[in-house]
Image: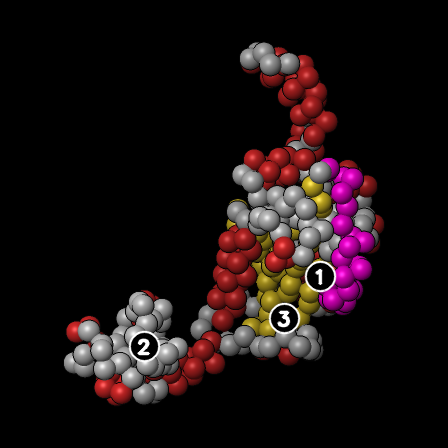
Amino acid sequence: MTREVVITGQGLLSPLGQDLSATWAGLHDPAAVAAAARTDVMPPFTVYPMAPPPVDKYVPKRGDQRAMGPFMLQGCVAAGMAMEQAGLLGNQDLLKQINLMVGVGGGERDEAVDEAILAALNGASDGNLLAEQLQTELRPTLFLAQLPNLFAGNISIVLGVSGSSRTFMGEESAGIDAVRVAYERIASGQADLFLVGSAFNAVRQDISLLYHAGGYLLQDPGLPFWRRPRAGMALGSAGAFVVLESREHAQARGVTPLPGWPAWSTTGAAANQAKRRRMPGVNGRPWRPGRGLPCCRVPPVSARSPPRSMPSCMNWCRVRPAPRFARRRWPWAPAWNAPS
């Protein structure tokens, strides 16, 4: 794993803008953040909905637009924006090389059908009525298009990505694993080009219901962070994709990596680890991975009076402080602090 991994394209949709620069500027503008908050969509909770993305440019077929909900459309548009910036959109030769990695949560539901079924049942446990409602109300094409494991399939069909595909189910860990696996496959030489990303639709009653049942939603986001009586989340819609590529492949097709993005290289990590191994250890022992940095050299807050407990760094360093501190700073040290 010695190849360099660079980012050649990015696509971002957020309540603060339709690209990275607008979103970054909105994050530094409290007035823009306050204007994006909505309390009338799902009262009493505050959500950050997204303005309608440019769907016609990246999803031109009306049938595809009707089959996909906001979650799928946001993902397709963000993926199209990243591919367009990387010079991949419409290039049939490169589309065959693109591997797709996505991280998704639960699939979208038809809220009108759910409400009709609940109204028809009205507390009764009738399996026949439920089966009849599902057969007559749900359209098979719409139902299949909204399954979470077909999120990558919709992007492949609409944008023409014909490489390998992999879907990670979950929340934050799914997105992390998608980026990690794509990076490791490029660095190890298994592939050259990846499209990685996900999307989230906050304007969904079922999502708010699930988070509220666990007590995770923020009741009053208008208060400053340190004055809030309890923790919580204000959900916001987003769609984000990046194009990961090996530096050799990007140079071969004449594409420059995005400025401001540091190149990811495993050789740098190996050099840093070797440098840490040459650091002077504690008690004469060299540093090893998993042992922790020699932060125990930091003296206690007060050298005149002994601390009430063991220094916090001792809990994870698993190494004893240097003997010179045991003699100078900690003359009262117990047996566990004695030099070996």
Could you say which is closer to the camera, residue 141 or residue 207? 207
Residue 170 location, x and y as percent? 53, 47
Magenta range is 18-43
SS at mark 2? loop
Q: CA distance from mark 2 to mark 1?
A: 57 Å
Query: What kind of colouring is applied to the model shown?
Result: secondary structure
Identified at 19% across, 73% down, the residue is 334
Graded by Cα atoms within 10 Å as few (under 14), some (14 to 19) or many (20 or more), the crowding at tag 2 reads few
- Residue 258 in sight from this viewpoint: yes
Left/right placement of residue 114 relative to residue 33 reads left
> Which disc, if any, is residue 11?
1
Asked whether the residues under the numbered discs 2 and 3 touch, taking CB atoms below 8 Å apart as contact, a structural biologist would say no
Q: Quadrant of the C terminus?
A: bottom left
Q: Establish if 8 lies above or below 226.
A: below
Q: Give the amino acid at mark 3.
A: Ile
Q: Which residue is mark 3?
A: 7
* Sequence order check, earlier mark of 2 and 3: 3
Residue 269 location, x and y as percent? 45, 78
Residue 143 found in image quarter: top right
> Which disc, if any, is residue 305?
2
Identified at 62% across, 35% down, the residue is 209
Identified at 50% across, 57% down, the residue is 177
Graded by Cα atoms within 10 Å as few (under 14), some (14 to 19) or many (20 or more), the crowding at tag 3 reads many
